[in-house]
């Protein structure tokens, strides 16, 4: 809305997990105290998901095709089917149930 008067369109890209250099270059610099074990468990899952993710070329190809459209969508989800599904399920489930599912994925 803020840039429409200048003829600009904005596209929000919502990427899932992709196999990039982020995982190997990640540096943990905070001391987390009693939260440390939960953080390590979640980080392990995140890094496993990232390393098993799709090639970032997928985002580039999809973005290229999207930018050549006459009109841009407002949002574009790119990633594995289960990650896209999670976004849609979140809109349907009560927050507490969705949080339980996400928590079990990252901490169990």
Image (cartoon, rainbow, N blue to C red):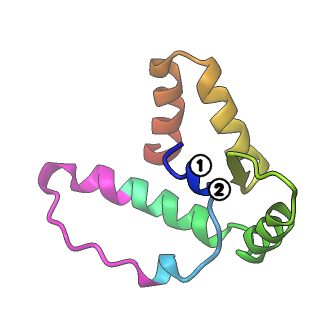
Q: Residue 101 — which label? A: none
Residue 38 lies in the magenta-colored region: yes
User: Taking the image as drawn, is residue 80 in sight?
Assistant: yes
Q: Marks 1 and 2: in contact by CB < 8 Å?
A: yes
Q: What element carries label 2?
A: loop
Instruction: List x then y, in percent, for residue 89.
Output: 66, 28
Say above or below: 67 vs 104.
below
Left or right of residue 7: residue 101 = left
Say above or below: 49 vs 104.
below
- The residue that appears at 60% across and 78% down in the rendered structure is 20
**Most extreme residue toward the top, as rendered?**
94
Tell me the quadrant of the picture where the N terminus can be found.
top right
- The residue that appears at 53% across and 52% down in the rendered structure is 3
Instruction: List x then y, in percent, for residue 40.
Output: 34, 60
- The residue that appears at 69% across and 31% down in the rendered structure is 88
Q: Which portion, as a residue range, is magenta?
A: 25-40
Q: Name the residue under label 2.
A: 7
Residue 35 lies in the magenta-colored region: yes
Left or right of residue 44: residue 73 = right
**Mark 2 and mark 1: Cα distance apart in space:** 5 Å
Instruction: List x then y, in percent, for residue 87.
Output: 64, 37
Q: Name the residue under label 1.
A: 4
- The residue that appears at 72% across and 38% down in the rendered structure is 85
Residue nearest the viewer, comparing 40 with 24: 24
Residue nearest the viewer, comparing 2 with 35: 2
When asked about the image quadrant of residue 37, the answer is bottom left
């Amino acid at each position: 809305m803020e840039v429409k008067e200048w003829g600009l369109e904005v596209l929000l890209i919502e990427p899932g997990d992709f196999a990039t250099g982020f995982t190997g270059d990640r540096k943990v610099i905070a001391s987390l105290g009693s939260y440390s074990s939960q953080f390590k468990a979640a980080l392990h899952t995140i890094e496993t998901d990232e390393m098993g993710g799709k090639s970032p070329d997928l985002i580039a190809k999809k973005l290229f095709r999207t930018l050549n459209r006459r009109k841009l969508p407002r949002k574009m989800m790119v990633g594995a089917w289960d990650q896209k599904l999670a976004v849609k399920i979140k809109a349907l489930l009560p927050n507490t149930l969705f949080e339980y599912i996400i928590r079990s994925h990252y901490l169990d």
